[in-house]
Amino acid sequence: METFIKSIPYRVKNNWTPFRVLYLILGPIVVFQTAFRGDYLGIAMGVYLFSMGLFGLGCGSGNCAAGNCEMPQRK
């Protein structure tokens, strides 16, 4: 966990993909739309999308946080 926290500045500055930008844009949109409706689950989902875009979390953004996205090749 400590190495992940130390890698946060690197993650914010590097490895930007179109999906990271999309997550970064859609996250606040989802948060504001669901906040006006009072849907707290939607707010949590929007915050998750925004954090995925900002920090490059998850394999869907092209940068796996745990480094375990690669599948071993079968022989």
Image (spheres, grey):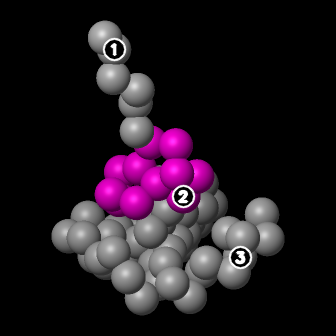
Task: Quote the CA–CA distance across marks 3 and 2.
Answer: 11 Å
- Callout 1 environment at 10 Å: few (<14), some (14 to 19), or many (20+)? few
Task: Quote the CA–CA distance across marks 2 and 1.
Answer: 24 Å
- Callout 3 environment at 10 Å: few (<14), some (14 to 19), or many (20+)? few
Is 58 in front, or is 50? Answer: 58
- Callout 2 environment at 10 Å: few (<14), some (14 to 19), or many (20+)? some
The residue lying at 26 percent from left, 64 percent from top is 19
Residue of label 2: 65
Residue with the most extreme left position: 18
Marked residue nearer the N-terminal end (3 or 2): 3
Is 39 in front, or is 3? Answer: 3
Task: Quote the CA–CA distance across marks 3 and 1.
Answer: 34 Å
Image depth: mark 2 or mark 1 in front: 1
The residue lying at 72 percent from left, 70 percent from top is 3
Q: Position of residue 65 (x, y in %)?
A: 54, 58
Residue of label 3: 5
Q: Would residue 68 be counted in the magenta stretch?
A: yes
Which region of the structure is painted magenta? 59-69
Question: The residue tagged with tag 3: helix, strand or loop?
Answer: helix
Question: The residue tagged with tag 2: helix, strand or loop?
Answer: loop
The residue lying at 58 percent from left, 52 percent from top is 66
Q: Position of residue 49 (x, y in %)?
A: 45, 64
> What residue type is disc 3 on?
Ile
Residue of label 1: 74
Marked residue nearer the N-terminal end (3 or 1): 3
